[in-house]
Image: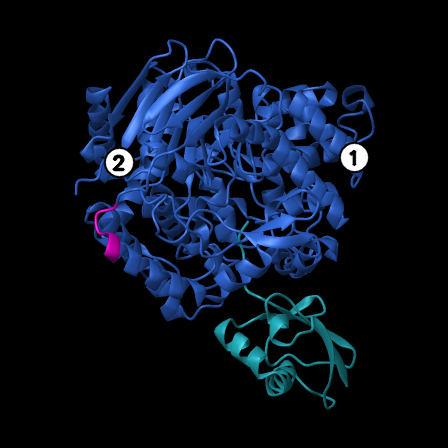
Amino acid sequence: MTHTSPIAIINLSTGEIKTTSTPDELLRAYLGGRGLNMAYLRHYLRQHGDPRSVDALSPENPLIVGAGLMTGTISPNAARFNVSARSPESGILGDANCGGFFAAAMRKAGFDRLIILGRAEKPSYLLIEDGQISVHAADGLWGLNAIEAQNQLKARHGSGTVSAVIGPSGENQVRMAAIMTGQKNAAGRGGMGAVMGSKNLKAIVARGGTVIEVAQKETLRALRLKQQEELKSSKVVQVLGKVGTPLLYEVSNRLGAIRTRNSQDNFFEETLNGEEVEKFSDKMLACTSCVVHCRHRNTLGGEGPEYSTLVLLGANIGIAPTDQVIQLNNLVNDLGLDASSTGTIIGWAMELYQRGLIDDSLTGKPLVWGDYETVYALIEDIAHRRGFGNILAESTQAARYFPQAALDYLIAVKNLPQSDPHDVRYFKGFALGIAVASRGADHLRNRPTLEVFKLPDEARANVYGRANDPDPTGYKDKGLIVAYGDDIYAVADCLGVCRFVTRGFNSPHLLGYQDFCDSVAAATGLEYTPASLRDVGRRTLDTERLINAGFGLTRADDTLPKRYFDDPMPARKTKGHHVDREQFQLMLDEYYAERGWDADGRVSAERIAEIDGLNDVIAGCS
Amino acid sequence: MNVHVRLAEPFWRAVGLRELDMTLPSASSVDDLLTLLRERYPRLGVDFDQCPPHIFIGEEEADAHSPLEDGARAHFVYPVAGG
């Protein structure tokens, strides 16, 4: 069987819809998901000459929705898709990854990837059904929150309908708006919901179709059973299935690594421990083909919270009661906001208010740590761009409304608020990771979680390919381990596979390159070696680096929030730790060398030529 | 001497209790506490073998050789990180 990857290029301005297949050479080079999205994103941005001329909220910004190569098959945890565009939040590469059931439904309905161009004249939605795409008026949908919009679409198109939608935040082009599917699954990072809103696109609806054909059905089934058994024997998979990511809270809090009150403090109340969240959970839920089941259904009318939301809408803004944090979690999801950016930006504003850098004349009322009612109303105001909420809706770009000193307290890299709740001043590999992550301050691009384990030297060498320094608070060899995470997580994103089953993410025993090679061969007939598969990840990273270079980014942008350099952590085991500026530069040197980039962080000429050649393949087909 | 033990996820599941009090001879160490826990709760010992915990005594991270004092609070934490 020859694997084909159908794509649709939809111009909402003209109504033209072109369907085609991804060229084989491109498919082989990038597989799918994040990798292919990056290849297409670079292509479409370059069509306008200087990518910096493309306003992220203009019709010229392409919005690319791409399923992973394995997504929708029976391979473990192959549920995911990426949404990519120029980010209206950071101004650079925008890319969000999401689970749930939408991507499998999109593939079954006939398409692996949608490239959405232009802007619809009036609010609209796309219907993908049995290999056909049509544009419909979003009458009666525009203005609805994310969950109700999905319910309405099910009522219109049948219970088998699966949608990816924006809430009011996306409609109002809030720069941290997410694209939502289900009650909680979010393509959250970088404001992809705002890009969708700028295109007058309320929803993408998938229905119908058949099972996804695979090359060797029985082989893939056998691999699934084997991999599932191995994964289920992993302790971290077992515990995630019982407690979900809130399990992380107690661990980080004990250490003193919880982002608290905008990282002025580093530990918080025990009310946000996993056991407290469990009291509000009545079921654990899964995504397509998942063997982990990490998502809570909460008894307050939503799903979650994840550890990130728990901290960023809890400790980071001083809110301790478990029920209040869960209510805020449900609110941001229904409004279609990225919980990480929202919690970070509100925490930032609260510290500015605490320090007197902003006052009631701007905020309209006091911004006090832990004031649940004010925060609840402020989140609604952000989504609807009302009052001070309209300023915070600009995310990091709200800095233009504040005194210059405000930037000293912003927890962001490359203008993207930090995604995760971990205070990275202690584990230096974590710090390097968020500094170099291609979409800005984000842990899911490369986090070397094995730093937390006290693995024997031999085991560490086995994972990372050579001996390395076991001290997680030191600076040596962090380039090696971050580059390892970069590559294997990029491959997982190209395949549509969840982090929680990917080797290196909290276990050295999860699915690795050889497992992925076996699954890809069984599903598609495409043959890879572990080395050639890893090179897909490296190519994806290089393509992202080129996209960001096109936006003018340099080595100077691979940095950290000022606080992480200058302010020592205040308490617990991590007390006194911060990131040394000179040592940080040495980590960068090592990281660039591991990536094969020059000392300024530039991709090699040989790789640029290869990627440009692949771009020519796209140009020849479009 | 008495030591208060808190077992974080997932260790408590092997015991059925998140918190318990252990009585040890005076001048005991963390190693003695581990031995007693393993003897009393064999399933917990299996979990500790599979995922060696981070052990905190009060605010300080401890190892097997760390001494214990009467009234110490021991916290056994699963080694995990993420976001």
Q: Residue at x 41, y 32 (%)?
A: A207
Q: Which chain is cyan?
A: B
Q: Which chain is blue?
A: A
Q: Would you call the spot at circle 1 few (<14 residues within 10 Å), some (14-19), or many (20 or more)?
A: some
Dominant secondary-structure state across the stretch colored magenta: loop
Q: Which residue is labeled 2 in the image?
A: A604
Question: Disc 2 is attached to a residue of which chain?
Answer: A
Element carrying mark 1: helix
Q: Which residue is labeled 1 in the image?
A: A354
How far apart, in angstroms, are the residues tagged by discs 2 and 1? 47 Å
The location of residue A385, given as percent across then percent down, is 67, 20
The colouring scheme, among rainbow, by chain, secondary structure or one colour, is by chain
Task: Establish whether labels 2 and 1 are both on one chain.
Answer: yes
The location of residue B37, given as percent across then percent down, is 63, 83
**What's the magenta region?**
A214-218
Q: Would you call the spot at circle 2 few (<14 residues within 10 Å), some (14-19), or many (20 or more)?
A: few
The location of residue A457, given as percent across then percent down, is 40, 69
A227 shown above or below A180? below
Residue A8, visible in the rendered structure? yes
Say whether residue A574 is magenta.
no
